[in-house]
Image (tube, rainbow, N blue to C red):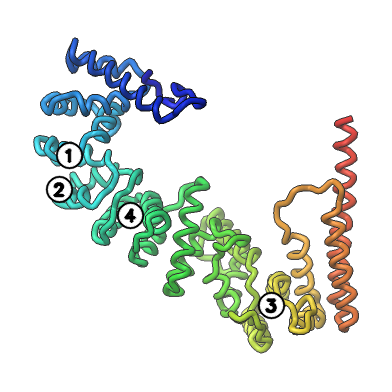
């Protein structure tokens, strides 16, 4: 009757709401009967024998007198983790709880209030507490059922949680305020929260989703570039280059600032990290730089209207040459550039890629840009289901063969050879998938 899974006590084939009410009435009757026959201690003893103690607390809140409730609180050995007491606090009217805590120390009051959802009223009360009691409150309050509405209480809550190194809770609150409840929040409050967020070793999918939403919200607010670059750098691993939540400020900087690009490239190559003595830290920075460059999809010279400014691209390439220092690093830079060319728009005459970009790929004598284009083409599909018929890969093979023929007709013979290599890669993938399908079929037979 008082198990954690109350849903298992209900017949889903019948009127669920009616059954819930009837179950509640039976449960209430049991607790009132114990109370009337044997008193408060018997109810508390009974609570110790059932699974769902917080449910008993719900009925205690409507059964016990004020004095009995005070005794229950005083006798609790751990207010913060007392499941029975939490059930009581959650079920009491706020006015009744407010009267109750007047007889308790600020420390105990802070613990009791921390059980409840954050609200403007609770924040106002906590601001009157001593720093010590307020610290206890902010260290223990949860984000469940957030009821904050005023700018002042929202700011106070987020700032205090951040000071307590609970920015992960601030992230949840901000997501709820912005996305769910559509409440306006100061932009600096969101940016400061993200800047103080200490990412744990493991991060769950929901927290990734919250972080992505907050970063995307800031990106749409056109924040200060330097602040956004720092935020995107810190959360690079949660920004998905295949979704609408990309590291757009970092990509913009790579595409417009050759000095910044070369700095990232050098760190990826292990240069410029001499002052860092820890090999593990060096390795992490290097891999972080690689992730940024490897997923970069915003080519230099691409304008907001989708047009390409070839002069900007050539100027960017010249800037890379001036800052690289050696040919190996320059060729690596051109390979990453070639990867972005895979996302170049069509030409105005309908050719499958802007002809200025096709010409750059054609005239790349070292072939680094074309190598990058090839790599991005064969890897751009990301994770996908294996088609044992090979039809998808054969279709892609045909598509790239056609593009190669078009490139030849337009004089881009070197680029055409790269397109044939891509077609051949998909052809080989198709053969492997067909063969793998035959193996699975033989196993099933």
Q: Are marks 4 and 2 in contact (CB under 8 Å)?
A: no
The residue that label 3 is drawn on is 326
Badge 1 marks a residue whose secondary structure is helix
Residue 422, how many percent across, how many down? 84, 65
- Residue at the disc numbered 1: 109
Disc nearer the start of the sequence (4/2): 2
Q: Residues within 10 Å of mark 4 (few under 14, many from 20)?
A: many
Q: Are marks 3 and 2 in contact (CB under 8 Å)?
A: no
Which one is in front, 417 or 122? 122
Distance in Å between CA atoms under marks 4 and 3: 45 Å
Q: Quick one: label 4 or label 3, which is nearer the N terminus?
A: 4
Kindly indicate the quadrant of the structure image that contains residue 426. bottom right
Residue 347 position (above or below residue 419)? below
Find the distance from the CA under tag 3 to the CA under tag 2. 63 Å
Q: From mark 1 to mark 4, how far is it between C-alphas?
A: 22 Å
The answer to whether the residues at label 2 and label 1 have Cβ atoms under 8 Å apart is yes
Q: Nearer the viewer, mark 1 or mark 3?
A: 1
Q: Is residue 101 left or right of residue 88?
A: left
Q: Which residue is mark 4?
A: 162
Residue 137, by quadrant, is: top left
Q: Is disc 1 in contact with disc 4, using a CB cutoff of under 8 Å?
A: no
Residue 286: mark in rendering: none
Whether residue 222 appears in this view of the structure is yes
Q: Determine the CA span between mark 2 and mark 1.
A: 9 Å
- Give the crowd class for mark 1: few <14, some 14-19, many >=20 residues within 10 Å: many
The residue that mark 2 highlights is 129
| N-terminal-most mark, 3 or 2 | 2
């Amino acid at each position: 009757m008082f198990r954690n899974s109350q849903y298992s006590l209900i017949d889903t084939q019948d009127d669920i709401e009616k059954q819930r009410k009837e179950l509640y009435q039976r449960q209430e009757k049991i607790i009132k009967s114990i109370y009337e026959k044997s008193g408060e201690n018997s109810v508390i003893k009974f609570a110790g024998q059932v699974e769902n103690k917080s449910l008993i607390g719900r009925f205690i809140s409507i059964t016990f007198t004020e004095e009995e409730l005070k005794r229950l609180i005083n006798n609790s050995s751990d207010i913060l983790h007392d499941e029975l007491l939490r059930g009581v606090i959650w079920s009491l009217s706020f006015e009744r709880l407010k009267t109750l805590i007047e007889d308790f120390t600020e420390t105990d009051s802070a613990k009791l209030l921390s059980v409840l959802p954050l609200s403007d009223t609770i924040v106002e009360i906590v601001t009157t507490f001593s720093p010590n009691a307020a610290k206890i409150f902010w260290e223990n309050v949860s984000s469940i059922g957030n009821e904050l509405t005023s700018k002042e209480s929202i700011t106070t809550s987020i700032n205090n949680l951040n000071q307590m190194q609970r920015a992960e809770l601030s992230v949840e609150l901000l997501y709820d305020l912005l996305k769910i409840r559509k409440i306006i929040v100061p932009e600096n409050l969101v940016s400061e929260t993200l800047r103080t967020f200490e990412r744990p070793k493991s991060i769950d999918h929901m927290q990734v989703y919250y972080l992505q939403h907050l970063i995307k919200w800031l990106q749409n607010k056109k924040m200060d570039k330097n602040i956004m670059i720092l935020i995107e750098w810190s959360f690079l691993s949660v920004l998905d280059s295949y979704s609408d939540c990309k590291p757009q400020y970092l990509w913009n900087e790579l595409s417009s600032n050759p000095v910044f690009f070369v700095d990232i490239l050098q760190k990826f190559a292990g240069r410029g990290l001499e002052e860092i003595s820890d090999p593990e830290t060096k390795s992490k920075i290097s891999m972080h730089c690689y992730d940024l460059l490897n997923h970069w999809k915003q080519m230099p010279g691409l304008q907001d209207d989708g047009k390409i400014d070839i002069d900007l691209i050539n100027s960017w390439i010249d800037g890379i040459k001036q800052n690289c220092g050696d040919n190996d690093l320059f060729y690596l830079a051109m390979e990453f550039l070639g990867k972005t060319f895979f996302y170049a728009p069509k030409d105005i005459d309908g050719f499958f890629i802007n002809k200025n970009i096709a010409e750059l790929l054609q005239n790349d004598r070292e072939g680094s840009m074309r190598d990058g284009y090839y790599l991005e083409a064969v890897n751009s599909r990301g994770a996908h289901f294996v088609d044992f018929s090979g039809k998808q890969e054969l279709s892609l093979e045909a598509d790239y063969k056609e593009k190669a023929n078009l490139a030849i007709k337009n004089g881009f013979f070197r680029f055409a050879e790269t397109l044939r290599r891509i077609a051949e890669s998909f052809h080989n993938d198709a053969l492997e998938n067909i063969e793998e399908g035959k193996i699975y079929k033989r196993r099933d037979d």
